[in-house]
Amino acid sequence: CTVIDAAELCRSVHASPSWRRGAGDAFGILSEYIGNLNADANLYLSLRRFVFDDDGKNENDGNDFNSNETTSNENGLMTILAQLSPEYQRMAHAMRREFERDGIHLTYTKREEARELNNVIVGLESLFSNNITEKTKHYDINGEELVREVDKIVPRHVLGRLVRTAPAAAPTAPSSTSSLTLSSDNLLTNTLLAHSPSAALRKEVYLQSHTSIPENLRVLDSLVRHRHLHSTLLGYPSYAHRVLSDRMVGTPERVHEFLDRMEARSRSVYKRDMEVMLNAKRRMEGAASDHGKIEPWDVPFYTSLIKAQRQHRRWKEDHDANPAGGDYDEDESSQFAGYFSVENSIEGMKMLVRDLFGIVMKEVEIPTEERWDVDTLNNAGQSTTTSNGGLKKFDFHHEEDGPLGTMYFDLHPRDGKFVHAAHFTIRCGRIRNDSSGHGNDDASNGRDKSNDNHQLPIVALVCNLSPSSTSSSSQTSLSHSEVETLYHEFGHGLHSLLSRTSFQHLSGTRAAMDFVETPSHLFETFSRDPQFLSSTLARHYLTGLPMSQRRAEHLALSHTDFRGVEVQTQIVHSRFDQALFGTEPCSASFPGGASSTEMWERLHEGAGVPFARGTHWHSRFGHLVTYGAGYYGYLYAQTFAADIWRSILSKRMSSSSPEALAAVRREGGTKIWKDMLIHGGAKDPKVMIRDVLDREPSVDPFFQGMS
């Protein structure tokens, strides 16, 4: 695991193409090796005989992943399994289930067939992901009017950094007024779609960026086919059934039930949001524009525009009610500008872990040999990162428990780097030596306080935040949405750092995939909390003054604006994911099978979500590889996070005095750590959530947060 985890990081982010290729090769070799281990009948039978006291005759025994059964053998003696601690029992069941999910019960010939299919799947997954990372589409914007629109939004010197590796065959002169080369770079695309009032420019940018990786359609078609063949060979009705068998939700049918309930409760808010957008478009572009409907390239622009207008209105109403407040600015665009930077965000993280957990987060030097933002083969050891600050490294230390682990921050874009945001585990935590022989019965009690017997975890947060325009990446001005992304990934990192388990296999985020987004969404919520914003996170880069409480409250309110659109889009993406990998998979290679693009269009039209025919954004949908059949988990986990926030943290953060606030913060943080984060995947997530809440979870707090 230590090697393959490091290879996963390097193939995704290393500055050197040679390193990325080598790491990709290593990842493929080790994936095949792990597949071979999971197909080793001798290992499997040894596990059954010596741990489960099972000779293998009854193939239906021991399939309950969450079972903690304590049975006796036929001689009345307790099995080895019954003598193990709950965590060791869970690990034993996980190992057995993993063997059986990979086809160990098959004949030798079919096991070999399953192994070959799995090797093909790993290769297709790598190809799909590499295409997203490596492929950039360049296209020309022609006409002085469109070029002027781009120049208003993105200065040429910034555009030069965003349009990376443009083809030399058709260079664009820096002073050209009639033609301009753009690229499918995510940051550039999102900026133009959100801020250009020109419908013509938005349409062109949308169509070009949403057709940028056509080769991935064939890769996805093959991936869907091979995942389905592999899963049915193993005895599952579909890939979705196989994936969901060890998730909290359990089955595809329950996923659809969950999505149906979420859609029913959010539909009215979505319809209202779309009507608001349509009215704004009619006022701005005329009633006859685009047949009076919202196009997909309209959504980013009008949601951004209306959010800004609402912020301005709220601000003005507050000022009119309290003219002496002295915190009003007629320019709504400046209300939140300049308050967020990498430096402020990291300082906020330091204060957060200190207040919640009593943890010190300290930046340390990075030896050259640890850096991956440097291409030593081609750049003589100079960082290739877009911003000058490069990679950052932090050690975490608890006042009682000692060192907890290390977290790297790789925050800005560069050529060849993974284009999304993600948390990578470089090394999982685990107990190295266990004198009891039975593991940790309770991860929060009886630990070696010095952590001498614990392998400390190492994780990396990888983002693609705004490139720096200053001499230090720490002073890079960020949008609030970028801060939300950073805190989301920080939640993942803390989950990995703060778990204390006996096995790497159960460490940190190696838990049920529809649970692991709960901590990340929980910590993302801090980036929107008015009290945390005004006291800690948001400080203006020029004056150093904190954001006022009123301004912070307005920012928090803006998160509820168009929440219906966000939720409905997530539901459609989740349904698409389930349709791809269901019992009737979307692959044209199957007789009568619909193509992925046809299903993408059908689901959007059925839900009334804007869609442009001929486009295929899903060819850039990297979660289909990492979260295939599990994308619903983001929305699923958001409901848990909203409940924990309102029940454990939100009420506690409203205490009157600083002393009382500090005490309740630590109380809430300790409960979240000791009842949930510390267990990683070593405990049933349903039990952990009940322990944190002291009751069954509810979806009501999630919908209370929608406008």
Image (tube, grey):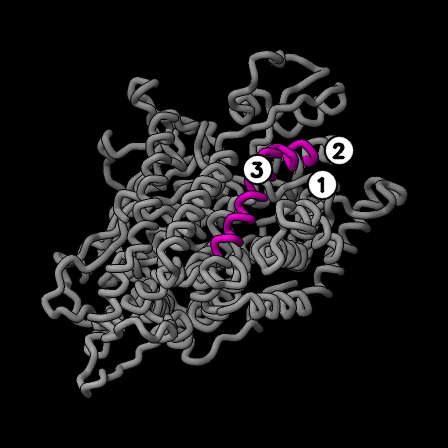
Instruction: Give the mark, 3 or 1, whose residue is nearer the N terminus.
Output: 3
The span from disc 2 to disc 3 (Cα, nearest Å) is 30 Å
Looking at the picture, does residue 663 appear above or below residue 416? below
Q: Is label 2 or label 1 in front? A: 1
Residue in the picture at 24% in, 69% down: 88
Mark 1 crowd level (few <14, some 14–19, many ≥20, 10 Å Cα):
many
Q: Quadrant of the C terminus?
A: bottom right
Q: Helix, strand, or loop for circle 3?
A: helix
Query: Of marks 2 and 3, which one's residue comes earlier in the chain?
Result: 2
Chain-order first, disc 2 or disc 1: 2
User: Which residue occupies the foreground of this view, 636 or 222?
Assistant: 222
Q: Which residue is mark 1?
A: 297
**Residue 82 appears at what percent x and percent y?**
23, 79
Q: Residue 392 is drawn in which quadrant? A: top left
**Residue for badge 2:** 198
Residue beneath the point at 66% across and 65% down:
263
Front residue of 304 and 610: 610
Circle 3 sits on which residue?
A: 216
Q: In this view of the protein, can residue 673 be seen by the observer?
A: no
Q: Secondary structure at mark 1?
A: loop
> Magenta residues, as a range?
206-231
Q: What is the spatial separation of the Cα atoms under label 3 and label 1, in whole angstroms?
A: 22 Å
> Mark 2 and mark 1: span between their CA atoms?
10 Å
Q: Nearer the viewer, mark 2 or mark 3?
A: 3
Q: Position of residue 382 (x, y in %)?
A: 32, 21
